[in-house]
Amino acid sequence: MRLQPRYSDIVLNLLVAIAISLVVNFSYLLLVLVEHSSTDTPPLPAGQRVAERLEEGVLRVHADGYGYLVYPDGDSVYVPSRRMRFLGLDAGDRIVADLSSPRRSGGHPVLEHVRTLNGTEYNYGTLYNRPSQWTELLLQLVYYLIMSFVMLTILTSTRRNYSMRLYIRRCLWCLVAAVGLYCVAPVTEWHTGRVVLNCMGGRMFDYMLLLKCSFAVVVSLLYSRIYVLISQRQAVVVENERLKNENLTTRYNLLVGQINPHFFFNSLNSLAMLVREKQDEKALTYIDQLSYTFRYIIQNGQSMLVDLGEELQFVEAYSYLFKIRYADKLFFDLEIDRSYYSWRLPSLSLQPLIDNAVKHNTITRNNPLHVTVRVEQGILEISNPRRPKLEPEPSTGIGLENLRNRWQLITGRDIEILATEERFTVRLPLLKPEQKA
């Protein structure tokens, strides 16, 4: 069972957000694990007691995180970093505490219980409401997971037509979301034990929180850019495969429609009519034009681009066959400046348009049909009045659809079809002689 693209993107963003959250909190997770394992220390040896010392010492914190309680007489007491964080002690605090004997020979006594802190009796009751380290870790993991997922969703919500301008706009929205999430980050007040929002904690600019949030933002931006580039590359590969399949289908349909049996039989009937009426000159001209038509179709059926001049020669030969069939009832008006003859277009582009004009319109002596072919500002325009037959011919739409597909495949541009009650017009953008498809 395969996930839909939308859900696969959500799952992928969620997995990346989990990874970012784990990386951001890796040091804190490692510290919790180490300190948790350090609590499994052996019991104090027999005879080791807690001693009371009524003097007030000043806490000095080492760069590595642990501290010493220094007394006026020069004695010092070791204070583990975990105990300082648990009790909410800071450098410079004046403390009266109970001490335990050193855990090893020659070591410092260890701070055991705090009696007063900065001249005030220490209340251990405030510690009972403090969340455990595992709870704090879980809050941090969930917070950075949500933060990363929100930013990744903003940055990767659009993959197609993902321009640099759109990417910059998404980055700005991502930064706005990051600022908002930074304000609602969960922080713990050591002295109260409460978990509050960062905007309510009194320390809005926490450098550690800023560092972690900045890391999550940078990783999200880099990942989203790589993700979009890979997605666009995959889209290009899929589009190329689709175009290849469509090209094969289009060529097949083109070959099927190029030599229409009805057209062939109608041409033979027109030729037979000329022979029966002993119009030898017209019959010879008709044979020449018919021969040229089929030769052009066979030679250019697999060609990509031809000059407009060559295509117009084919149109003249092809339209002559219809003129003989619809004597004095069908006219082709070519209004093209010779300067456009060297411009390029896909071969056999005008044939389906001529066929449609003849197939779907009433052609009589009183209402002859005029098909106009002209060029305006590099646009080849084929137009004819709309005179639907009383019994319309069945239309599959394959001709125009094939023409549109071939034009997009070869030139990368689209054709324009204008259909009103009075006229039917198709506009084909030509390629300049030096312009390559």
Image: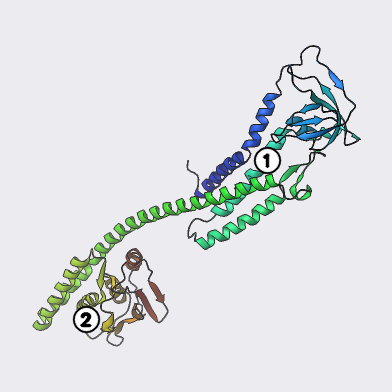
Looking at the image, can residue 11 be seen? yes
Q: Quadrant of residue 37?
A: top right
Residue found 23% across the figure and 81% down from its top = 326
The label nearer to you, 1 versus 2, is 1
Q: Residues within 10 Å of mark 1 (few under 14, many from 20)?
A: many
Residue 94's tag is: none
Q: Nearer the viewer, residue 312 or 158?
A: 158
Residue 347 horizontal/vertical position (percent): 26, 69
Viewed as shown, does residue 169 lie left or right of 237?
right
As displayed, is residue 237 above or below residue 64?
below
Looking at the image, can residue 128 be seen? no
* Distance between mark 1 and mark 2 Cα atoms: 83 Å
Viewed as shown, does residue 413 lie left or right of 89?
left
Q: Nearer the viewer, residue 395 or 206?
A: 206
Residue closest to the far front:
73
Q: Nearer the viewer, residue 314 or 45?
A: 45
Q: Nearer the viewer, residue 267 or 258?
A: 258
Residue found 61% across the figure and 58% down from its top = 173
Viewed as shown, does residue 60 lie left or right of 168?
right
Residue closest to the far top:
46
The C terminus - image quarter: bottom left
Q: Residues within 10 Å of mark 2 (few under 14, many from 20)?
A: some
Colour mapping:
rainbow
Residue that carries the numbered disc 1 in the rendered image: 140
Determine the secondary structure under disc 1.
helix
Q: Amino acid at mark 1?
A: Gln
Residue that carries the numbered disc 2 in the rendered image: 323
